[in-house]
Amino acid sequence: MDVVTERQTTAVTTPSQEKGIYSWPGKAYPLGATVQKHGVNFSLYSKHATKVVLHLFKDRNDSEPLLSFDLNSTIHKRGHYWFVFIGNIGHGQVYAFQVDGPWQPEAGLRFDAEKVLVDPYSHALCFSEDYQRERAIQAGSNMDACMKSVVVDHMTFDWQRTQSPRHSLTDTVIYEMHVAGFTRHPNSGVSEEKRGTYAGVIEKIPYLKSLGVTAVELMPVQQFDLSDAPPGRENYWGYSPINFFALHSGYSVEQDPLAAINEFKTMVRELHKAGIEVILDVVFNHTAEGDENGPTFCFKGLQNPAYYLIDKQTGQYANYSGCGNTCNANHSVLRRMIIDALHYWVTEMKVDGFRFDLASVLARDSDGQPMSQPPLLWSIDSDPILSSTKIIAEAWDAAGLYQVGSFIGDRWNEWNGKYRDDVRAFWRGDSHTVSRFASRILGSPDIYGCQHHSPHRSVNFICAHDGFTLNDLVSYSEKHNWDNGEHNRDGDNHNLSCNYGVEGPTTVTEIEALRHRQCKNMLATLFLSLGTPMLNMGDEVRRTQQGNNNAYCQNNELSWFDWQLVDKHADLYRFVSMLSQLRSKEPTLDWNMHRSLNSVLDSVEICWHGIEPHQPDWGERSHTLALTVNHPLTDDELYVVCNAYWDPLEFTIPDREQTDWHLVIDTAAPSPCDIYSVDEAPRYADNSVVVTGRSMVVMVAK
């Protein structure tokens, strides 16, 4: 048994005084804190460390350790791994490390023996009541104001034999949502203690089901630091993880890291029971430690160059993420950690897929150069544990690397930023848009066709968390981010938005009617396009952020889902629900995802039209597009007319022998006449249809 050594900076108790707690050499694998029969094994990677101390605490608020264990490099180190077994401790034990080593910033080494470090593999983190982010930046010890790790044993949760729904991408409708913002508003109808929590999401499962959602894509639930934001504001979005395993405990009813794990698992279980998958938005491109002026929480103080891209000339952090640092994702140590984290979320937390934030960063090598065969991305693509999950790339980064259409592998799906831009531009009435719009609604064959990708390679979206909401897209011509405290400099300036005459809310009936119609136009386009649709939280009821297109630090009613809008815009909610039903039931839209996009399009008879049948206008000033789509097996046919021109236009309807046309969608009509189920769609007897300016008409032949 090793001796617990006294340290000048900590109050130490001998093992015999603390229920027989003792240490043993331990093992290098597995990494992190692993609960075993008689205690916990700790293992930590640090190649250049000269000293490692493990601290045990009674609880999260302890300003001094209960026990401290100095790890002996002869006994507790093999290769680059430090390890120790501590007997008679277990689930819930609070712990942390202090690690000493060279301070050589020019070489990328930033060891600081005074900083308390969390375990990069810990499954739970806790914050003391006196936690201060600044203390992890300033010189000196932060023992009394630090975050700590918590030992977790996952053997206690009852999954009740619930299985993942595992929907095919053909049947998938994704709903991007913020866990807290979904139910935090006082009018959510959720009990006060459950607002803004994983448990609150459970109470809204009937809402998601009625909307036709088959998968929720949760904005980051990896533990982040609320104080990682401008002064006087909070980090709301969570795109700055502290480590890649720990769950954000602030979204739990009890605000406790262990309770949060069970609450999250319960949410996943109940969503699965309802047939809804859980996709996590994961951030592996940067961390909360920021640049050389940022805090030391974990990676910086362990083996900085293994985790971050470092400029070999200056020792400063590369910044391809736009957030101060960039993860060295293809370093063998971090690459293994990311794969281990993905395995953890799938095997222990039972999630169904991942959306990778700024995924193109993960294609860069240790010098920051893009690789044609990035090891990490190929490992994810071919990993057997991840083989049944959905993997979605945000196929660009903040330094100009744009890989939409060229991301590696066959398994990856991509957020199609070109879909967003071209659909917005067409419906806004921009010139030079008709050809691109036509490609987008057919799954973007100009982007994905040459690579023989699936028809569902493209994840289509009009709006997401980053940018305007759908309501604001048709209500503001400029961003209004003044509340962020950055003088309106933050956020994208290229929004392809339009206010149609008045900036912001208006009582002008004509403008409001046009905005409402434009919302329907873009939503109908989204659900009728080939690819996988993703709906942004609240767009189905015109949620607004008052023109803020970068609400990352707005943890308030500006960002929260206002549930009064469900009644106020009940017609739009119904419209989206009916679109989901139409997509799931109409055979013309059920194209086989197991073939390439090109082969699918070759097997479907598509005819392009203009005002007259078979006379499409592909000119630069054209604002109209019509097409008929004939299903090769059922002979069902759709006629779709998109009129982005500002005046009404009369379209001659193509002849259809032995069947009649039935009106399914007219975005200019009042509810409930704006959308019908196929079975209830009224017969349309005329041979032409007047399509209102900036509106869409869809008919089905039967």
Image (cartoon, rainbow, N blue to C red):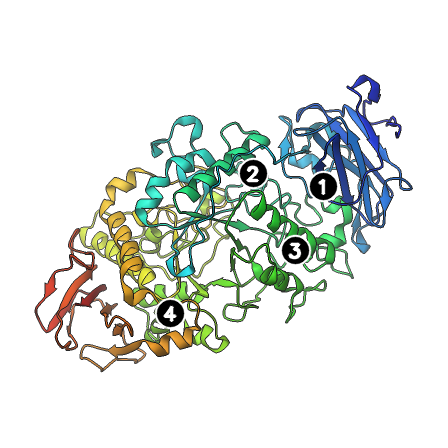
Residue that badge 4 annotates:
440
Mark identifier at residue 326: 3
Q: Please name the amino acid that badge 1 sits on.
A: Gly
Q: CA distance from mark 1 to mark 2?
A: 18 Å
At x 27%, y 72%, the residue is: 623
Residue that badge 2 annotates:
248
Q: 645 or 120: which is nearer to us? A: 120
Q: Please name the amino acid that badge 4 sits on.
A: Arg
Q: CA distance from mark 3 to mark 2?
A: 21 Å
Using a 10 Å C-alpha cutoff, classify the residue at mark 4 as few (fewer than 14 neighbours), some (14 to 19) or many (20 or more). Answer: many
Using a 10 Å C-alpha cutoff, classify the residue at mark 2 as few (fewer than 14 neighbours), some (14 to 19) or many (20 or more). Answer: many
Q: Position of residue 148 (x, y in %)?
A: 68, 33
For marks 4 and 1, the one nearer the N-term is 1
Judged from the image, the secondary structure of the residue bearing numbered disc 2 is loop
Q: Is residue 23 above or below residue 691?
A: above
Q: Nearer the viewer, mark 4 or mark 1?
A: 1
Q: Please name the amino acid that badge 3 sits on.
A: Thr
At x 35%, y 75%, the residue is: 432
Q: CA distance from mark 3 to mark 4?
A: 32 Å
Q: Nearer the viewer, mark 3 or mark 4?
A: 4
Single out the residue that lies furthest toward the right: 74
| Left or right of residue 643: residue 70 | right
Task: Please indicate, yes or no, whether residue 213 appears anywhere in the rendered image.
Answer: yes
Residue that badge 1 annotates:
32
Q: CA distance from mark 4 to mark 1?
A: 46 Å
Judged from the image, the secondary structure of the residue bearing numbered disc 4 is helix
Quadrant showing the N terminus:
top right
Task: Please indicate, yes or no, whether residue 240 appears anywhere in the rendered image.
Answer: no
Judged from the image, the secondary structure of the residue bearing numbered disc 1 is strand
